[in-house]
Image (cartoon, rainbow, N blue to C red):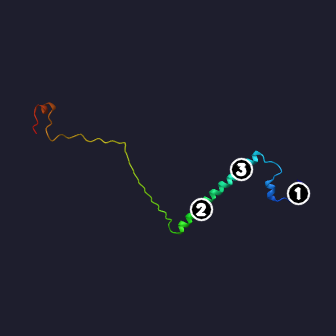
Amino acid sequence: MLDAERRNDSFFSALTHPTRRLTNLEKVLGGLGIVLLLLASTFIGLFAGAEHALKKEKQNGGYHTVTQIISATHTATHSGSSTTAPAPTGSPHKVRSAVEASDEPYSR
């Protein structure tokens, strides 16, 4: 083709019939760009749909938030000091030795 004929072609025919072949890097980058555009449009659509559904539910009065707070407090205090009890003052009954108690049968 001549340059004069090439200038008369439309924009889309120039895209479909390039003058040189694309390199592998250009092909990979082009494919990656298309994949990223599809991925972005998918997530944008999902986000917009969720926002629309929430807005619609809120307008119908079906959107309520319930907050419940439960708290518990436990406090334990331990001291390291010890106290001693006073010595016993004596028994109200006569204390018998173990030998005397074993000689008699149960007398109580």
Amino acid type of the residue tagged 3 in the rendering: Gly
The dot on residue 56 is none
Kindly identify the amino acid type of the residue bearing the numbered disc 1. Glu
Q: Quadrant of the C terminus?
A: top left
Q: Is residue 27 left or right of residue 61?
A: right
Residue 31 is tagged as 3
Q: Is residue 91 left or right of residue 59?
A: left
CB within 8 Å, label 3 to label 2? no
Choose mark 3 or mark 1, whichever is in front: 1
Q: Of all residues shown, which one is farthest toward the front?
A: 1
Pointer 3 and pointer 1: residues touching (CB < 8 Å)? no
Please report the residue visible at 63 percent of the width from the left and 58 percent of the height from the top.
Answer: 44
Residue topped by disc 2:
49
Under circle 2, the secondary element is helix
How far apart marks 1 and 2 lie (CA) works out to 49 Å
> Which residue sits at x=11%, y=31%?
103
Tell me the CA gap for discs 3 and 1: 31 Å
Judged from the image, the secondary structure of the residue bearing numbered disc 1 is: helix
Distance from disc 3 to disc 2, alpha carbons, whole Å, reads 27 Å
At x 58%, y 62%, the residue is 51
Residue 64 location (% of width, % of height)? 49, 65
Tell which of 95 and 2 is nearer to you.
2
Left or right: 85 in relation to 81: left
The kind of residue on which mark 2 rests is Gly
Q: Secondary structure at mark 3?
A: helix
Residue at position x 54%, y 69% in the image? 59
Residue furthest bottom as drawn:
60
Is the residue under label 2 in contact with that under label 1 (CB below 8 Å)?
no
Nearest to N terminus: mark 3 or mark 2? 3
The x, y position of residue 93, in whole percent, is: 14, 40
Q: What is the total number of numbered labels drawn onto the structure image?
A: 3
The numbered dot on residue 5 is 1
